[in-house]
Image (cartoon, rainbow, N blue to C red):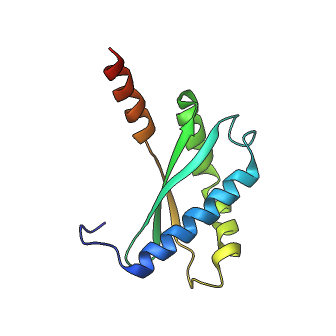
């Protein structure tokens, strides 16, 4: 993405996608994601609203690769469900690309270092 700041519409759409995707993922439950808790921590959307970068944090962190695989496998169906929720507001439902949000792991690592 560009380094210029996102527009108001971009931010509103990103927040709506984050809220709706979190609801969809919560509805699937932890069993769908191999017993891991999945949280949508951030969504960044391209200026033309065609691609949404979805950052997820996964707990416990041992299941990260397994859950990322599940997310990429079911990305199309998640996009379809998202389309039903936001289809009235957007002409095109953005392509979903999932990324692992490692900020929690980083914070945990810093906390461990501070304890030493």
Query: In the image, what residue occupies the spot 70% across and 66% down?
Result: 81
Q: Depth check: 84 or 103 in front? A: 103
**Quarter of the rendering containing residue 112:** top left
Q: Is residue 1 above or below residue 115?
A: below
Q: Is residue 6 above or below residue 108?
A: below
Please state the total of marks drawn on the protein image.
0
Q: Is residue 41 visible?
A: yes
Q: Position of residue 6 (x, y in %)?
A: 34, 73
Q: Is residue 35 above or below residue 95?
A: above
Q: Position of residue 42 (x, y in %)?
A: 47, 57
Query: In the image, what residue occupies the spot 60% across and 49% down?
Result: 71
Query: In the image, what residue occupies the spot 65% across and 36% down?
Result: 36
Please state if 44 lies on the left or on the right of 22 as rendered.
Answer: left
Q: Is residue 48 visible?
A: no
Q: Position of residue 102 (x, y in %)?
A: 42, 40
- Looking at the image, which residue sits at the far left? 3
Q: Is residue 109 above or below residue 19?
A: above
Please state if 7 lies on the left or on the right of 77 as rendered.
Answer: left
Q: Position of residue 70 (x, y in %)?
A: 62, 44
Q: Depth check: 77 or 18 in front? A: 18
Query: In the image, what residue occupies the spot 71% across and 74% down?
Result: 84
Quarter of the picture containing the C terminus is top left
């Amino acid at each position: 993405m560009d380094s210029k700041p996102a527009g108001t519409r971009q931010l509103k759409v990103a927040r709506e996608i984050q809220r709706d995707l979190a609801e969809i993922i919560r509805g699937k439950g932890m069993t769908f994601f191999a017993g891991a808790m999945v949280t949508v921590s951030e969504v960044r959307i391209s200026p033309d609203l065609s691609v949404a970068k979805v950052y997820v944090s996964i707990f416990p962190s041992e299941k990260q690769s397994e859950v990322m695989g599940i997310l990429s496998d079911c990305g199309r169906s998640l996009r379809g469900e998202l389309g039903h929720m936001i289809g009235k507001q957007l002409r095109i439902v953005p392509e979903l690309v999932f990324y692992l949000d490692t900020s929690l792991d980083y914070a945990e690592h810093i906390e461990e270092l501070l304890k030493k």
